[in-house]
Amino acid sequence: TPSPALSVAKDVARALDIPGVWSAGQRTQKERTRSSGLREIDSALGGGWPEGSLIQIATDHPGLGLSLITPLLANLPQSQRRVAIIQPPFIPYAPALCSRGVDLGLVLWLQPARAEDSLWTVEQLARSGLLGGIAYWGESMHSTAERRLQLAASEGDAIAFHFVSRSRNAHSYAAVRLEVFPSADGVDIDVLKCRGGRAGHRLRHRCAD
């Protein structure tokens, strides 16, 4: 007869087994990734950005870190999957995006009037299955909203990037958490959490943001 402690442990494990949500220590057999187009990112994350996932990019400098995802924004439309830019801190500069290979005809730029509308929009687009990538600039999410967005990205097989101010909160449902800092010749990147890769180290991206 199983001990009461073992039964409780199994109940807790089942309760925490949330589809699409990764827990630290959990090993995945075949992690699907899409190349970031940047060798240092692909190496650190075990092949690239994890498909169907929420990626958190934290920085105290509005707009910093966009160069980390520009190669992906350029490559996704080649498979005819649109990308969305939602509530960026600055007006997207079309000539710069075009020079980096981004097809503007397949890019949606949305600027909802209210923060709650932005979050609802991101979740619906992530779940729709019509978009391959979403870049969203917004405030830190509470745990329920973050979990909903991770599940929506998993259901829609989209990569959802959430650009947010740095926070001391160590808990997150995101599959990958990065902190980005300006450097003399590009940006420095602290890998705080990654699914299937190596966390706890710093990278340097030598392309000016």
Image (cartoon, rainbow, N blue to C red):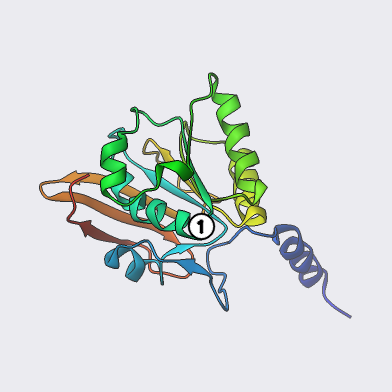
Residue pictured at 38% horizontal, 64% vertical: 199
Q: Quadrant of the C terminus?
A: top left
**Residue nearest the observer in this picture, 144 or 135:** 135
Which residue is at the far top? Answer: 113
Residue 190 seen in render: yes
For the point 27% across and 34% down, the residue is 61
Q: Which residue is mark 1?
A: 175
| Residue positioned 40% across, 47% down in the render | 103
Tell me if 11 is positioned left or right of 118 in this view: right
Horizontal relation, residue 97 to residue 24: left or right: left
| Secondary-structure class at tag 1 | loop
Image location of residue 43, percent across then percent down = 33, 71
Residue 1 % position (x, y): 89, 80
Q: Residue furthest right?
A: 1
- The amino acid at mark 1 is Ala
Tell me residue 126's x, y (percent): 60, 46
Which quadrant of the figure has residue 141? top right
The extreme left residue here reads: 184
Of residues 200 and 122, the one nearer the viewer is 122
Q: Residue at x 61, y 42 (%)?
A: 125
